[in-house]
Image (spheres, rainbow, N blue to C red):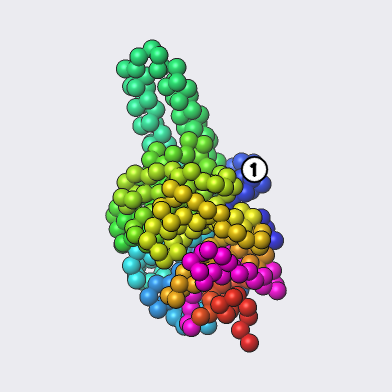
């Protein structure tokens, strides 16, 4: 099994390889951005990384640019027309027709017909240029601060300026290589307003449905450029981002400003959901660690579990059941508001990347083996 399943969220080994890619590899990346996803009857059994319900439809995204949709709770699937062949990592809908999918090479795709056809809105090249322009603005601002600062403060500010120049050089080097950095999470509240997040601290915002994008990295307390893996809105209205090194960022004003919360776990967090209760956050990730907060991340408790497998995604059913899924066929279910979880490991041990509650108390699981319908515990239906 691939580490973190085809590097949906990058591990250290995958990052090391990305830095070694040569110019021919960059051209190959450009090719798959310009090559439409191939139509295949096996798309629903290949790796799928995320799934989302929009109205009565379920849409799923995966490797090779595959996007599928089902109007019968996952019993049958139709492959969408997609203009790229890169691995897609996440999707979200801002309405029942307008949706966005993100993936490797910094691609952002948009649909206005509930997932049947998609257009390319952004690539890693444009994203890198936005980040470079933003960093240049930060450098200009810092230089002015140093010029006006008293001598006692200049030393610290000059160190900060050096860090900005170093970050700018890294961004320029990445641009020379090509669109290699993936986007890993996406959230939209409407057909106009949304965010995408990704590797090396990428966070972009649009207020016009993806026609233009703004680099938001300076608004996040993430000077080390750690990966941002997932973004969601919880009940009560707050936005939450989680990522590498235990990062948790919370916004209570639709993303205008963000506050970094102290985390009791310093490993990577790959997913975050609400519990269905106001201001409650459930974050999860590496080695099965789960963090639960009832007050927007001001305080946390570690949820006990001996499952041990990395957790990738979660969902809350209409009856309040919380399901988390992860590597090694892991399915965790809570009926007590995330106080505790019952574990089940599917016999195939295939990694599960996302979960959607479907008819009755059943689940749709997507991952290494494509899309599978199970009971509420993750067991195969008889």
Q: Report the residue marked by disc 1.
A: 16
Residue at left offset 41%, top offset 17%: 154
294 within the magenta span: no
Q: What is the magenta range?
A: 331-360
338 within the magenta span: yes
Residue 16 higher or lower than 361, as above or below: above
Task: Report x, y in % for residue 273.
Answer: 46, 60
> Which quadrant is home to the C terminus?
bottom right
> Which quadrant is home to the N terminus?
bottom right
The residue nearer to you, when weighing 106 against 270, is 270
Give left or right: position of 211 versus 103. left
Q: Is residue 210 visible?
A: no
In the picture as drawn, the residue positioned furthest to the top comes out as: 151
Residue 312 higher or lower than 336, as above or below: above
Give left or right: position of 6 versus 178. right
Instruction: Count residues near mark 1 (Cα–Cα under 10 Å), then give few for <14, some for 14-19, many for 20+.
Output: few
Residue 350 quadrant: bottom right
Residue at left offset 51%, top offset 80%: 361
Task: Report x, y in % for residue 162.
Answer: 48, 24
In the picture as drawn, the residue positioned furthest to the bottom comes out as: 382
Query: How many marks do you count on the picture?
Result: 1
Residue at left offset 36%, top offset 49%: 251
Task: Report x, y in % for residue 250.
Answer: 40, 49
Task: Report x, y in % for residue 175.
Answer: 50, 40
Residue at left offset 48%, top offset 35%: 223
The residue nearer to you, when weighing 236 against 349, is 236
């Amino acid at each position: 099994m691939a580490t973190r399943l085809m590097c949906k969220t990058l591990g250290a080994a995958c990052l090391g390889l990305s830095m070694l890619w040569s110019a021919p590899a960059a051209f190959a990346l450009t090719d798959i951005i310009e090559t439409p996803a191939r139509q295949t009857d096996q798309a629903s059994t290949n790796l799928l990384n995320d799934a989302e319900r929009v109205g009565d439809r379920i849409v799923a995204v995966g490797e090779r640019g595959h996007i599928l949709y089902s109007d019968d709770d996952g019993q049958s699937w139709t492959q969408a027309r997609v203009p790229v062949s890169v691995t897609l990592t996440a999707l979200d809908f801002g309405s029942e027709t307008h949706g966005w999918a993100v993936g490797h090479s910094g691609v952002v795709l948009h649909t206005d017909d509930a997932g049947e056809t998609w257009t390319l809105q952004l690539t890693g090249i444009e994203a890198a240029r936005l980040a470079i322009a933003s960093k240049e603005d930060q450098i200009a601002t810092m230089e002015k601060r140093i010029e006006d600062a008293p001598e006692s403060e200049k030393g610290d500010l000059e160190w900060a300026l050096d860090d900005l120049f170093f970050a700018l050089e890294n961004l320029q080097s990445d641009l020379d290589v090509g669109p290699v950095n993936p986007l890993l999470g996406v959230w939209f509240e409407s057909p106009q307003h949304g965010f995408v997040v990704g590797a090396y601290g990428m966070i972009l915002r649009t207020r016009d449905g993806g026609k233009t994008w703004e680099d938001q990295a300076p608004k996040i307390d993430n000077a080390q450029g750690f990966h941002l893996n997932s973004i969601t809105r919880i009940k009560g209205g707050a936005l939450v981002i989680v990522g590498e090194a235990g990062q948790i960022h919370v916004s209570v004003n639709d993303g205008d400003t963000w506050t970094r919360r102290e985390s009791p776990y310093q490993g990577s967090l790959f997913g975050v959901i609400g519990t269905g209760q106001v201001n409650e956050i459930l974050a999860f990730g590496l080695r099965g660690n789960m963090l639960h907060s009832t007050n927007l991340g001001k305080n946390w408790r570690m949820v006990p579990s001996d499952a041990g497998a990395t957790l990738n995604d979660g969902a809350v059913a209409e009856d309040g059941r919380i399901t988390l899924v992860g590597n090694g066929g892991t399915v965790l279910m809570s009926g007590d508001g995330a106080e505790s979880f019952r574990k089940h490991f599917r016999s195939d041990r295939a990694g599960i990347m996302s979960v959607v509650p479907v008819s009755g108390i059943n689940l749709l699981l997507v991952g290494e083996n494509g899309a599978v319908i199970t009971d509420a515990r993750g067991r195969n239906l008889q």
